[in-house]
Amino acid sequence: MRAMTHQRYENIDALRAVAATLVLVQHFFGDVVREALDPKGPLAQLVGLSLNNVDLGRFGVVLFFLISGFVVPFSIRGTRPLKRFAISRFFRLYPALWLAVLLLSVIAALRDEAPSIATVLANMTMFPSLIGFKWLSGIYWTLTIELIFYVLCAALFWQSILYKPWVVMVFTLLLIGSTAVPILARTQFGTNLPVQYIGLHVSFLYCGLLLRLAMIEKSQGAWVCAGTIILAQFAVLFCIGDFSLARGDGFFLVGTAPIIVAYILAFAAFICAVYTGKPESPILSRGGSISYSVYLFHGAAALMTYALFPLTGGWSDLWIGLTSLVVTMFISFGVYTYLETPMISLGRKVMTLSESRAVSVI
């Protein structure tokens, strides 16, 4: 059983690499559409066709959410588990984010768009949008979702209900409802309730948790709970498309079909990957290990690349995209090797020191 679990985790690392790659591709496509000198160029037209049929970026994001829900809640363990969890998440996520924020601030300053100190500090918290500031890079919005998920997981663990499928199902339905109810109130009854998509986004991480309980832990009733959540999520997705497009809030960008297809493909890929143990690839697994840095730094790499080689909308943009990818991988590998890995080790040392002090006090 331990060997099977290890194999699946290697597989999940490879799946992270797939998700990160598709996010990069989608953002490159978006850059071509927005910034190409010739919006009617052959590549620009092909990219537009892709964007109108499937949102590869949302596919990658949902895949990341399912993976986080599948893995992260089960890292809460050991003596003083919540303290260990908080320390490990802090050292795993924040140092690399701070470096990315610094790099983006420098790039913005070089473009005469220097952010305020308050904006930079707000970005360093990982939840600037919750305190009235904008992300320096719009692609970082998922970090806030992940952070909220971690806090909620800690709270459920503290109450000893994190791994109870029926409780998690009810809690997740409430999260979905926090998005669905205000939209229904607006569209059906004209009530001007504030609308946010945070609850719906977080629900996909909890769906990953339920799928783990169903497929790996074999918890009683977990499949029923996971199925209920999936049905509720897609029911809401089908209902809010027109609302989101009319508001132009960015949840649905060019139509309902690209987003719905992306969610369907993400669930199918995730469930198939867990069941089959595929993809099995050392290269992809290695890529998955640096996926966080890829996520953080690919936007900055693109900005630097486009400054030297402006997008044209023609086939030559493929070489520009490849150059941006190489720069991204170079930066990401360096950050993972010289910042992420040492910080993860430091976090473990802090946890060990904290536990040894607790033992000595006892």
Image (tube, helix red, strand yellow):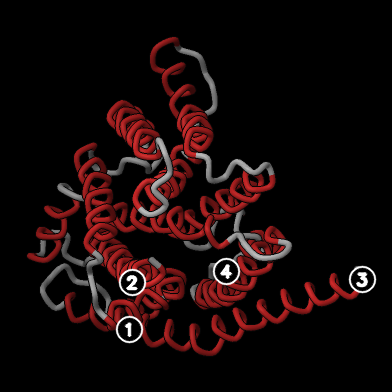
> For the residue marked with disc 3, what is the amino acid?
Val
Q: Position of residue 214 (x, y in %)?
A: 37, 46
Q: Residue 204, which numbered label?
A: none
Q: Nearer the viewer, mark 1 or mark 2?
A: 2
> For the residue marked with disc 1, what is the amino acid?
Leu
Q: Residue 361, which numbered label?
A: 3
- Residue toward you, 196 or 361: 361
Lateral position of residue 297 relative to residue 52, left or right: right
Q: Nearer the viewer, mark 1 or mark 4?
A: 4
In this figure, which residue is indicated by the disc labeled 1?
308
Lateral position of residue 73 relative to residue 91, left or right: left
> For the residue marked with disc 4, what is the amino acid?
Leu
Q: How many marks?
A: 4
Q: Residue 93, which numbered label?
A: 4
Q: Residues within 10 Å of mark 1 (few under 14, many from 20)?
A: few
Q: Could you say whether the residue bearing mark 4 is in a helix, strand or loop?
A: helix
Q: Could you say whether the residue bearing mark 3 is in a helix, strand or loop?
A: helix
Q: Quadrant of the C terminus?
A: bottom right
